[in-house]
Amino acid sequence: MDSEIESLIADVSISAHLATAVGDRPHVAPVWYDYHDGHLRVLTGGRKLENVRRNPRVAVSIERADGPAVEWSVTLLGTADVVEDPERVREVSRRINAKYRGTDEAGDTSGGAMVDVTIGSASAQRY
């Protein structure tokens, strides 16, 4: 992936929107994420996780905005793997909590899993 795109999404504490689809019905939901070593990872359960299990092709949209003024947006297309290894899930939970909550403790990871997105293509737009 382009280093400019990596620098935009790596450390910002803004939410992204993860889009999954099964059949002809897309499902888009806001998520907190961790970007590390070329992978975007989210912790999730419910419908998003169910959709990824059935169709691993996903899209992610991230943007930085200040009120109505959008600074930049990034669109990622990729393939998601479900990871249920407790240690890997806790590691990502710690990174997400450090980024969004300012604590390096893992949150409650029971009942969910990690979705690890291998990014196939990425594009950025500055406004």
Image (spheres, rainbow, N blue to C red):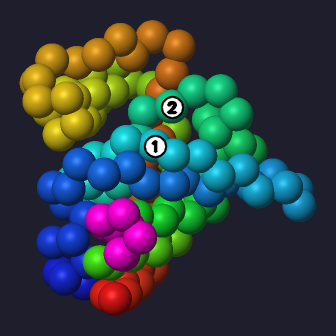
Tell me, yes or no, whether the highlighted magenta stretch contains residue 65: yes
Quadrant of res 56:
bottom right
- Measured along the vertical axis of the image, is residue 109 above or below residue 55? above
* Residue at x 46% of width, y 43% of height: 31
- Name the kind of residue labelled 1 in the image: Val
What percent of the width, then of the height, locates residue 18? 54, 53
- Measured along the vertical axis of the image, is residue 8 above or below residue 82? below
The single residue placed furthest to the front in the displayed view is 67
What percent of the width, then of the height, locates residue 70? 36, 75
Q: Main secondary structure of the magenta part?
A: strand
**Is the C-beta separation of discs 2 and 1 under 8 Å?**
yes
Tell me, yes or no, whether the highlighted magenta stretch contains residue 34: no
Quadrant of res 67:
bottom left
Instruction: Give the label on residue 44, or none.
Output: 2
Residue underneath mark 1: 31
- Measured along the vertical axis of the image, is residue 24 above or below residue 69? above
- Name the kind of residue labelled 2 in the image: Thr
Q: Is residue 18 left or right of residue 83?
A: right
- What is the span of residues highlighted in magenta in the rendered image? 63-70
* Residue at x 29% of width, y 16% of height: 107
The C terminus - image quarter? bottom left
- Measured along the vertical axis of the image, is residue 32 above or below residue 55? above
What percent of the width, then of the height, locates residue 117? 44, 55
* Front label number (2 vs 1): 1
